[in-house]
Image: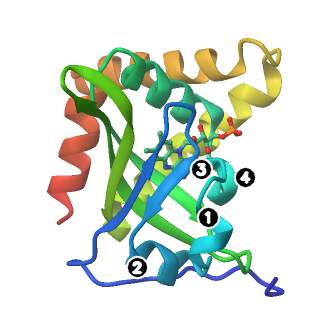
């Protein structure tokens, strides 16, 4: 582990791709995933995707991700991920059910570099979510912070989470 965690950056055209089974265990990672996270393939395959979970990420984001995937819909979100060395990188992620013959066989995710201005914005939102989660009971923390996020977006911007988050990404490209 490095002493002070540093941000790992990469260029705009890089796509970081992974696939999972139905439980979120990694079944595929592309070479950009391995290079940026600094995990070799053997350390990733078969492991829960939470292997790259960063402690700064609110639980509410993953709560919403899984709820959306279980409804057979795609999820968009900004994600701070951990590298094997304890460093981090920010992505704008799309996560989708992998549907074969009408049946969900797993999930996959394609991630791009997150624009810096969008990260600055979302960091403050995530900070609020983490604070809410630390005050809530363990059982309700994730749903509470997710509800707060979607309600706040609706109140302040008059739009859904999806509209807001896609707008935040596109406006800073
Ligand atoms: C296709 C797919 C991609 C995922 N990508 C990430 C990711 O990049 N980073 C991450 O922390 N969790 C990712 N997750 C979510 C993890 O499975 C897990 O829910 C999350 O890390 C929270 O873990 P925890 O509940 O053990 O704290 C992904 C899930 C799926 C299905």
- Image position, residue 155 (x, y; %): 33, 17
Looking at marks 4 and 2 on the same chain, the residue that comes earlier in the sequence is marked by: 2
Q: CA distance from mark 4 to mark 2?
A: 24 Å
- Image position, residue 61 (x, y; %): 52, 34
Image quadrant of residue 137? top right
Foreground: disc 4 or disc 2: 2
Residue named by callout 2: 31
- Image position, residue 116 (x, y; %): 37, 69
Q: CA distance from mark 3 to mark 1?
A: 8 Å
Looking at marks 3 and 1 on the same chain, the residue that comes earlier in the sequence is marked by: 1
- The answer to whether 149 appears left or right of 118 in the picture is right
Looking at marks 1 and 4 on the same chain, the residue that comes earlier in the sequence is marked by: 1
Residue named by callout 3: 49
Residue labelled 3 has its Cβ within 8 Å of some atom of ligand 1: yes
Q: Is residue 155 visible?
A: yes
Please tell me the numbered disc located at residue 44: 1
Foreground: disc 1 or disc 4: 1
Image quadrant of residue 127? top right
Q: Residue at x 20, y 20 (%)?
A: 102
Please tell me the numbered disc located at residue 55: 4
Looking at marks 1 and 2 on the same chain, the residue that comes earlier in the sequence is marked by: 2
Q: Residue at x 50, y 15 (%)?
A: 147
Q: Residue at x 66, y 53 (%)?
A: 47
Q: CA distance from mark 1 to mark 4?
A: 19 Å
């Amino acid at each position: 582990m490095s002493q002070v965690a540093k941000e790992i950056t990469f260029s705009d055209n890089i796509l970081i791709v992974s696939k999972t089974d139905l439980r979120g265990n990694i079944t595929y990672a592309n070479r950009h995933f391995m290079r940026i996270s600094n995990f070799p393939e053997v350390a990733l395959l078969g492991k829960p995707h939470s292997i790259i979970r960063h402690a700064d990420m609110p639980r509410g984001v993953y709560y919403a991700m899984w709820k959306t995937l279980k409804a057979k819909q795609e999820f968009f979100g900004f994600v701070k991920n951990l590298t094997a060395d304890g460093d981090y990188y920010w992505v704008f992620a799309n996560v989708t059910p992998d549907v074969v013959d009408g049946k969900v066989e797993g999930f996959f995710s394609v991630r791009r570099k997150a624009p810096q201005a969008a990260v600055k914005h979302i960091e403050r939102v995530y900070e609020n979510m983490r604070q809410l989660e630390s005050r809530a009971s363990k059982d309700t923390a994730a749903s509470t912070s997710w509800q707060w996020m979607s309600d706040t977006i609706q109140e302040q911007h008059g739009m859904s989470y999806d509209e807001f988050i896609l707008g935040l990404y596109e406006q800073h490209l």
